[in-house]
Image (tube, rainbow, N blue to C red):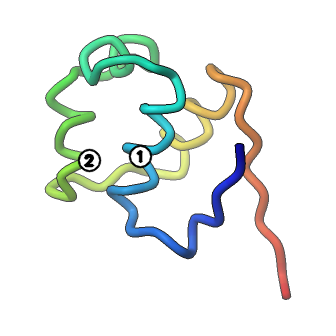
Amino acid sequence: MKIVANDYKEKEVMKILREWTGKKQPDFGKDIGLSGMTVQGYERGTRRYTFETLMKIAKKYGYTVTIEKK
């Protein structure tokens, strides 16, 4: 699967990444060293995640993060 992150809000990207794993927020958070409440905050847009968090998710689940100049 592939998404263009520019087409989504930050909170939507996090939810998509989690849904691809098939995990609930608490289990997803545990896998990357965070609480389920933190993941919930990311998905609601009440908390912001860092690039470091995004890379941690990518490494854990084998996702590729690509930045492309057009």
Count neighbours of disc 2 (C-alpha within 10 A) and say few if under 14, some if 14 to 19, many if 20 or more. Answer: many
Residue beneath disc 2: 43
Left or right of residue 25: residue 13: right
Which quadrant would the N terminus be assigned to in this image?
A: top right
Tell me the quarter of the picture where residue 67 sits: bottom right
Front in this rendered view, residue 29 or 8: 8
Residue at point 51%, 22% (across, down) = 21
Residue beneath disc 1: 14
Residue 31, x across and y down, in percent: 44, 12
Tell me the quarter of the picture where residue 54 sits: top right
Look at label 1 and name its amino acid.
Answer: Met
Which quadrant would the C terminus be assigned to in this image?
A: bottom right
Residue at point 57%, 74% (across, down) = 6
Numbered circle sitting on residue 58:
none
Please give the count of numbered marks on the rendered protein: 2
Element type at mark 2 = helix
Residue 63, x across and y down, in percent: 71, 35
Residue 48, x across and y down, in percent: 29, 55
Spatial separation of the CA atoms under disc 2 and disc 1: 6 Å
Element type at mark 1 = helix
Residue contact at pointers 2 and 1, CB within 8 angstroms: yes
Look at label 2 and name its amino acid.
Answer: Glu
Count neighbours of disc 1 (C-alpha within 10 A) and say few if under 14, some if 14 to 19, many if 20 or more. Answer: many
Front in this rendered view, residue 53 or 17: 17
The vertical placement of 5 against 30, above or below, is: below
